[in-house]
Amino acid sequence: MIEQADLVGDWDNAAGAWLHVADDHSAAVSGLNHAVPDTKCPATVSDAAWQFWVRDGAPGSYTASDSATKGGSFTLALKTTTADPAERCDVDVKVRRDDRGFNLCLVMDPDQTCAAGELLRKVAARPQ
């Protein structure tokens, strides 16, 4: 589980993927194809939204929530340049923790896993 405060910020990987997660549930992504090689989604989207997945009562059943403040995974809704709702593209994001801290695995199918080079890690805050 990751707290929203720990999730907010910039995430990237060495292959060139970058994800910005904002506390108002907006997001932006570039180089998505460097984190999700089989994606049909646009590689760059500046107008995205995210929601934590939370249990909705039934065993194994989850729903996306704007009010949840922590979670083990979240959905990233990538809006496209067309007005057609069918053009929206959703990416599931699994939050994991290892000896280097939190990492994000972006997938099109929740059963997928990420190779080490596809994992996004939080970009260190720059001193001001």
Image (cartoon, helix red, strand yellow):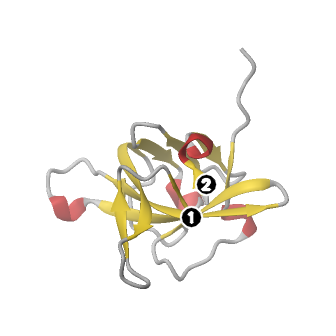
Quadrant showing the N terminus: bottom right
Q: What is the three-letter code of the residue carrying label 1?
A: Gly
Give x and y (percent) for residue 68: 43, 53
The label number, if any, that marks residue 112 in the structure image: none
Circle 1 residue: 72
Q: Is residue 57 above or below residue 98?
A: below
Give x and y (percent) for residue 69: 48, 49
In the image, taking residue 49 as reference, residue 69 lies left or right, namely right
Residue at the outermost top position: 128
Circle 2 residue: 2
At 64% from the left and 47% from the top, the residue drawn is 12
At 75% from the left and 19% from the top, the residue drawn is 127
Q: Is residue 22 above or below residue 120?
A: above
Mark 1 and mark 2 residues within 8 Å of each other at the beta carbon: yes
Q: Secondary structure at mark 2?
A: strand
- Residue sitting nearer the eye, 37 or 70: 70
Give x and y (percent) for residue 42: 39, 56
In the image, taking residue 77 as reference, residue 70 lies left or right, namely right
In the image, taking residue 62 as reference, residue 79 lies left or right, namely left
Q: Secondary structure at mark 1?
A: loop
